[in-house]
Image (cartoon, helix red, strand yellow):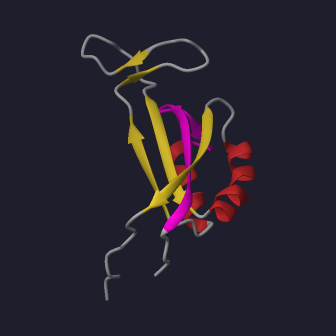
Amino acid sequence: MTSLTGTAMRLMVFVGESDVWHHRPLSSEIVHRAHKAGLAGASVFRGVEGYGASSLIHTARLLSLSEDLPVCIVIVDAAEPIRAFLPQLDELVGEGLAILDEVEVVRYVGREAAR
């Protein structure tokens, strides 16, 4: 099991729910590539409302027909593996926002693997 404590990096990637990579949801492709790269963890969060560079507001309100809600992929690991992963984002993300910030990991404990 990987140990991750102390100073780390958080990579947050904001894209649209309808963004795809070769007929697969872009968020799923990013998570699977992060896993393949051996990064400590990745999660996808679906927003209920937001806007980005296009200035179009996307919302999940009942009367709205928006099908492109904001999605945020959060990946946390040490700085070196996160920075090594960035070129893959350049390949995958045509429209969106990626940010890095330093974080302090206070607890990182996984479940025991199924036997």
Q: In the depicted view, which residue is nearer to us: 20 or 92?
A: 92
* Residue 72 appears in the figure: yes
Q: Residue sitting at 31 percent across and 76 percent down?
A: 111
Where is residue 113 shown, x and y percent of the image?
A: 35, 82
Left or right of 102, for residue 86: right
Q: Residue sitting at 62 percent across and 39 percent down?
A: 98
Q: Residue sitting at 47 percent across and 39 percent down?
A: 72
Q: In the depicted view, which residue is nearer to us: 99 or 64?
A: 99
Where is residue 85 shown, x and y percent of the image?
A: 68, 57
Queried whether the magenta region covers residue 10, the answer comes back as yes
Where is residue 17 shown, x and y percent of the image?
A: 47, 33
The residue range painted magenta reads: 6-24
Q: Is residue 47 above or below residue 1?
A: above
Queried whether the magenta region covers residue 7, the answer comes back as yes
Left or right of 84, for residue 18: left
Query: Looking at the magenta stretch, what is its main secondary structure?
Result: strand
Where is residue 51 shown, x and y percent of the image?
A: 49, 19
Q: Residue sitting at 61 percent across and 18 percent down?
A: 53
